[in-house]
Image (cartoon, rainbow, N blue to C red):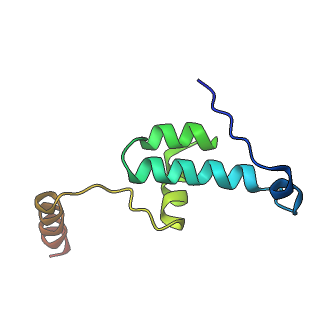
Amino acid sequence: MPVTVSLPDDILANDNADIARQVLEQVALEGFRTRQLTVAQVRRILGFRSRLQVYEFLAAHGVAWVDYDEEELQREVETLRKLAL
């Protein structure tokens, strides 16, 4: 279902050619932060071709895309330590 957002003309007229994209990006970021959107959904919304582009986008906006719990993180750290030996 498409969603239409209406913004006042004066906002769009002030050299804000990218305002539509910025609004879309903010919706995608907030949706991902609140777990309402998946990486795949963010990719589709923003028209990215790959998950990597989504990861780069999220990282550029300070949004962590890796969702580790503490136990999983510790297992990863231990595995890395073993591999480094």
Kindly indicate the quadrant of the structure image that contains residue 75.
bottom left
Q: Is residue 53 left or right of residue 30?
A: right
Residue 81's place in the image compared with 70, above or below, is below
Residue 38's place in the image compared with 78, above or below, is above
Q: Is residue 2 left or right of residue 38?
A: right
Q: Is residue 45 left or right of residue 64?
A: right
Image position, residue 56 (x, y; %): 53, 59
On the question of residue 48 being in view, the answer is: no
Image point (49%, 46%), residue name: 51
The outermost residue toward the bottom is 85
The outermost residue toward the top is 1
Image position, residue 34 (x, y; %): 38, 50
State which quarter of the image contains the N terminus.
Answer: top right
Image point (28%, 55%), residue name: 67
State which quarter of the image contains the C terminus.
Answer: bottom left
Image position, residue 52 (x, y; %): 51, 51
Image point (82%, 60%), residue name: 16
Image position, residue 58 (x, y; %): 49, 59
Q: Nearer the viewer, residue 56 or 46?
A: 46
